Image (cartoon, rainbow, N blue to C red):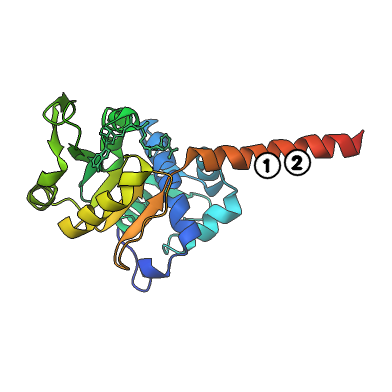
């Protein structure tokens, strides 16, 4: 069985919605591999990943992976294919800027390493933070950003500063050569076209759950 994307399966053709589910499939595959099994049916993988199996088969067909009738997917092969598409076959060093409450929690989380990432550098500007050590990493002053980004080969950064500082921090990151930013600050960042930004906002997720709660209570009223 092939271990790389088959000819004709161009990662640029994979829909964004599929890409957003690939990390879930990868996580499920790692968990299944730990149980010692070598193959998994599309239904089994779909249950492990929490999606519907028709959607999973469609997603994996974008990778040129169709599974074998009666056998399913080879877990090791599919893991390699998804890791290739996500660019996870190389360990990626990540910088984190803003070592406050949230930054410290993220920097202290041990679960990134086995998902292909490591926080390699921490930055802040507060006098009482710069120079301290967190999980063996020194908190450096933002002035050192360009030097460290270049030395560590960092292309991805996480912003956990207050929103008012986030745009300036993003500008510094872009100048230093960072081309992907995960922004936790509740603001919109203006970046050049070659820079990818993803925003994480738990308040948005809660508002969506609030909508579902609101709808459930409205439906309940209609039903009674
Ligand atoms: N996305 C989410 O779901 C979510 C959840 C919680 C907090 N947040 C956001 O995360 C951010 C951090 O929250 P927090 O509670 O950790 O705040 P915090 O005040 O504890 O930490 C912010 C840190 O950023 C540093 N900082 C300020 N300006 C800086 C700059 N120019 N360069 C480098 N570092 C700078 C501060 O010194 C401090 O250490 C805020 O924007 C907050 O709104 C987002």
Q: Quadrant of the N terminus?
A: bottom left
Instruction: Please give the name of the residue rendered at 69% of the width and 40% of the height, measured from the top-left corner.
Output: 212
Q: Secondary structure at mark 2?
A: helix
Q: Quadrant of the C terminus?
A: top right
Asked if one can make out residue 66 in the rendered structure from this viewpoint, the answer is no
Residue 30, percent from left and from top: 37, 38
User: Residue 215's mark?
Assistant: 2
Determine the residue positioned at 46% across, 61% down.
16
Q: Residue at x 37, y 74 (%)?
A: 8
Q: Position of residue 183 (x, y in %)?
A: 36, 47
**Badge number at residue 129:** none
Q: Mark 2 to mark 1: distance in Å?
A: 6 Å
Direction from residue 120 to residue 215 in the image, left or right? right
Whether disc 1's CB lies below 8 Å from ligand 1 is answered: no
Check disc 1 and report the residue beneath it: 211
Is 134 located above or below residue 199 in the figure?
A: above
42, 133: nearer the viewer:
133
> Do callouts 2 and 1 mark residues in contact (Cβ within 8 Å)?
yes
């Amino acid at each position: 069985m092939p271990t790389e994307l088959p000819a004709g399966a161009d990662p640029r053709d994979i829909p964004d919605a599929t890409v957003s589910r690939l990390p879930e499939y990868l996580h499920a595959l790692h968990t299944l591999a730990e149980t010692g099994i070598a193959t998994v049916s599309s239904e089994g993988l779909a249950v492990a990943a929490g999606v519907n199996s028709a959607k999973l088969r469609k997603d994996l067909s974008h990778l040129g992976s169709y599974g074998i009738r009666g056998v399913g997917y080879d877990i090791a092969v599919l893991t390699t294919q998804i890791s290739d598409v996500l660019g996870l076959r190389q360990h990626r060093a990540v910088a984190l800027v803003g070592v406050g409450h949230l930054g410290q929690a993220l920097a202290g989380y041990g679960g990134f390493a086995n998902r292909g990432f490591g926080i390699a550098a921490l930055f802040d500007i507060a006098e009482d933070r710069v120079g301290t050590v967190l999980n063996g990493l020194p908190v450096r002053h933002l002035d050192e950003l360009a030097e460290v980004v270049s030395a560590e080969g960092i292309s991805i950064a996480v912003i956990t500063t207050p929103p008012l500082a986030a745009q300036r921090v993003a500008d510094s990151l872009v100048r230093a050569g960072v081309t992907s930013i995960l922004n936790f600050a509740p603001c919109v960042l203006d970046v050049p076209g070659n820079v990818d930004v993803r925003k994480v906002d738990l308040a948005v997720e809660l508002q969506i759950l609030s909508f579902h709660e609101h709808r459930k209570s409205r439906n309940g009223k209609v039903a009674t």
